[in-house]
Amino acid sequence: MRFRSKQIHAGVTPDPTTGAILTPIYQSTTFVQESVDSYLAKGYSYSRSGNPTVRALEKKLAELEGGYDATCYGTGMSAVNCTMLAFLSAGDHAIISDVAYGGTYRLCTKVLSRFGVEFSFADTSNPDDVKSKVKENTKLFLTETPANPTMKLSDIAAISEIAKAANAVHVVDNTLITPCYQRAIELGADLSLHSTTKYFDGHNATVGGAVIARTKELDEKIRFIQNSTGSIMSPMVAWLTLQGCKTLSVRMEAQSANALAIARFLESHPKVKQVAYPGLESFPQHQLAKSQSSGFGAMLWFEVEGGLKAGKQLMDSIELWTLAENLGSVESLITHPVTMTHADVDEAERKRVGIIDGLVRLSVGLEDGEDLIEALGKALEDVEV
Ligand SMILES: Cc1ncc(COP(=O)(O)O)c(C=O)c1O
């Protein structure tokens, strides 16, 4: 099956007892066993260890990413946490994208570092910088590409090679672009990670996470942690995400087309100082975007002439766009990462990696692109620079 057919049919079959076309929400804590000797004959015992609705989503995501299997979590951060717990122990070292999501940075620096794990933050857009940070005890590499919110890209194949040579796992946070456009595992990654909160859900309805593993061995390691830490996704969230998956590529295509039109509009606007969108020819890593993904996604950022003050004025006054955290939904969202999503990243580190004070992040939704552009145009007109 091709991607669009898999989105709809992978992992699901009509309910065998009723014929319901949608996988039911198996909202049940426990599963009755027919006898002691036939324990687990039907595959399930207790919903922390496995649930049929969650399992259907796991199978679908594994097929969409081209992995061996997938595990689903209560949040994207729980997926990041379980990945770290599965592949790192006290005394180990990990190399993390210096532009990784603020929550990932916080988890590494303020939580996992307390348990004897050492982290280095590397410019993963430069494989040489990654290579220079490898140590004897490096066990895990995490790249986020495109990165939230800088949109910086990392060469998945090149970093997978470095990880392989170091005998470490390479985890790619593929949240911002999804397997619709970028197959991290096919490009060499060992694990592809998602906040399903974003494009898989797509409707601002849930929070969730997923990790798709290249091999059985990798999947078993992380599934053990999913169960041991009690991190599994809930059946209701899995059910909503299953429905979101079915329209993923249709939404991605329309939202990405809107994003490209918006990026071009902003690029030519006199009150806009800079725009970053991988689909623009002016984007420094445009060639890498073209070579490792089949589309450019629907996230971008820009800076208004007049910096932070003008940016805040625009975000507070713009119509149609909603000032909120989250990304990937059908609703277009506008965010100020410095005060919102990335507030916990140290100021010096934030500046060093390019999260400038005036950065305005756009998650382009599914509204009519012309309406979105008109709203941006009006807000820019009103801004005092
Ligand atoms: C790239 C990326 N990874 C992980 C996460 C964490 O996901 P969640 O908010 O579902 O915990 C986010 C959230 O914004 C994200 O943008």
Image (cartoon, helix red, strand yellow):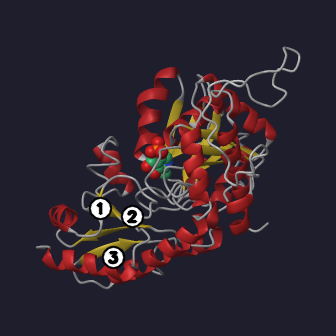
Q: Cβ–Cβ below 8 Å for labels 2 and 1? A: yes
Residue 257 in picture, x, y percent from top left: 49, 78
**x, y percentage for residue 204?**
43, 54
User: Which sits in the foreground, 344 or 229?
Assistant: 229
Q: Secondary structure at mark 2?
A: loop
Mark 3 residue type? Leu
Q: CA distance from mark 1 to mark 3?
A: 11 Å
In the current view of this chain or complex, which residue is farthest to the right?
37
| Viewer-side residue, 306 vs 331 | 331
Q: Is mark 2 within 8 Å of ligand 1?
A: no
Position of residue 298 relative to residue 124, above or below, is: below
Question: Where residue 165 sits: x, y (%)?
Answer: 74, 46
Q: Which residue is mark 3?
A: 372
Whether tag 2 and tag 3 are in contact, CB under 8 A, the answer is: no
The residue at 44%/77% (across/down) is 258
Q: Quadrant of the N terminus?
A: bottom right
Q: Which mark is residue 322?
A: 1
Q: Earlier in the sequence, mark 2 or mark 3?
A: 2
Q: Please rate how many residues cluster around mark 2, counting C-alpha atoms within 10 Å: few if below 14, some from 14 to 19, many from 20.
A: some
Q: Amino acid at mark 1?
A: Thr
Q: Badge 1: few (under 14), some or many (20 or more) residues near its Cα, within 10 Å?
A: some
Which residue does the numbered mark 2 point to in the structure image?
331
Asked where in the image residue 220 lies, by quadrant, the reply is: top right
* Residue 187 visible in this rendered orientation of the protein: no
- Mark 2 and mark 3: Cα distance apart in space: 11 Å
Q: Where is residue 47? Give x, y as percent.
A: 64, 28
Left-right relation of 151 to 5: left
| Residue drawn where x is 40% and y is 53% of the image | 326
Q: 1 or 181, which is in the foreground?
A: 1
The amino acid type, in three-letter code, at marker 2 is Glu
